[in-house]
Amino acid sequence: MATQILMPALSPTMEEGKLAKWLVKEGDTVKSGDILAEIETDKATMEFEAVDEGKIGKLLVAEGTEGVKVNVPIATLLGDGEKADAKVDIASAMQSIKSAVTSEAAPKTAAAPKPPAAPATPAVPAAAAPSAGADRVFASPLARRIAEQKGVDLSAVQGTGPRGRIVKSDVEAAQPGAKPAAAAKAPAAPQAQPATQSPAGIAPLPDARAFFKPEDYEEIPHDAMRKAIARRLTSAKTLIPHYYLTVECRIDTLLATRASLNATSPKPAPGGGEAGGFKLSVNDFVVKASALSLLRVPEVNASWTDTAILRHKHADVGVAVALDFGLITPIVFAAETKGLAAISNEVRALAERARTKKLKPAEFEGGSFAISNLGMFGIKEFTAVINPPHAAILAVGAGEKRAVVVGDKVEIATVMTVTLSCDHRVIDGATGARFLAAFKQYIEEPASMLL
């Protein structure tokens, strides 16, 4: 029986994507690791690899198709001796796929009490369940054949393929004669969190088109990234109890240190490129100071869940990057362990890949803290919306000359205003204040970052 190739979930939050391009055609022979297609999510374009070997039977979804749901069949894979059926009509296949998705969205258990009606919001995707009984072993035809040759009991093998399916590499790594292990208790599918739902009793906003004549505006449809931003940050702003703390930092010493370090950067190497070169920005100092402050005040380096607060062991700092088509926050992992030059070059490389949609999901999803810097646009001060799973985000304004009082004298100093948005479920006011005090010290005395 032909194996279905399903639309992959290329990130933990992916619900649908665009099948941008097929890199195989019907009748092609593929093996594990071959690239089958390019899939566009809301923030990146990624390659989709085969997990089994075989022959491509039918391509069920045409390239360029948008809004293809995760776990929907997009092609078939034939094993040895299997033959493809009559050519599938793409339009009919897509219609049946939409019907299947609609039926999957219906409640599965009649006995379960129905939740109260709420405004339509994107549902949290549930883990796909096997379509047969619990005793059935899901394995590819090739994996079954290798298991029979090696004398491997498939019920004792843990599958790593889609939806726990056993593939070739799983059987090759298994020991012949292994006894079936007791069925491991599968982790419970994450329940819909309150952060994905609108509060009860709040009426939806009216459609803005009701207030204008059609000839007075141009309608620009939402792309996947804009929908994701709207959905995620509306939930965050509505359901996370934000509060804000602001502090002003003198950065004259930092600017002098930055200029001095940049002057020591190696010159471009012969033939192009740089031999260990760097060009530090103020934001690089902000990233490093934030990471060290998270270590000094670890209560801020945390995430909220319904059952516990997750205290992170490393300062994984996301840096917001503005794109022509939206916003993305690539992450500098373990930033506390990296020097300014390393942070600078890493942020620059991440931003460049973000602009070409080449980031991998692991490079922009997660993290423990975030920075949004609008200083380069001349913005003096602003507040930012917390991006879950973070419990805080630092909004950084422009450094500008201001009159400051030092003792009984008025001096001219370069001052930068920063505002910390905090999740009050995780961070109390005094805790947020201690974080900003540590951050201010690192920024005003950049040499202390070396201690």
Image (cartoon, rainbow, N blue to C red):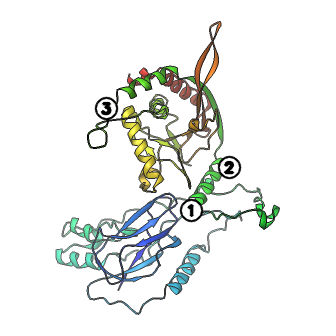
Q: Nearer the viewer, mark 1 or mark 2?
A: 1
> What is the distance, in whole Å, between disc 1 and disc 3 at their CAs?
42 Å
Compare residues 161 and 131 and report the one nearer the observer: 161
- Up-down relation of residue 253 to residue 130 (above or below): above
Q: Name the residue under label 3.
A: 266
* Mark 3 residue element: loop
* Identity of the residue drawn at 56% across and 56% down: 325
Q: Give the side of residue 367 with respect to residue 49, left or right.
A: right
Q: Give the side of residue 205 with respect to residue 98, left or right.
A: right
The residue sitting at the top extreme is 408
Q: Give the side of residue 343 with respect to residue 41, left or right.
A: left
Question: Residue 178 is drawn in which quadrant?
Answer: bottom left
Residue type at mark 2? Thr
Q: Mark 2 points at which residue?
A: 238
> What is the distance, in whole Å, between disc 1 and disc 2 at their CAs?
21 Å
Label 3 CA crowd tier, 10 Å (few <14, some 14–19, many 20+): few
> What is the distance, in whole Å, between disc 2 and disc 3 at their CAs?
48 Å
> From this viewpoint, is residue 186 visible?
no
Q: Where is residue 317 in the image (x, y as percent from the top left)?
A: 46, 40
Q: Mark 1 points at which residue?
A: 224
Residue type at mark 3? Pro
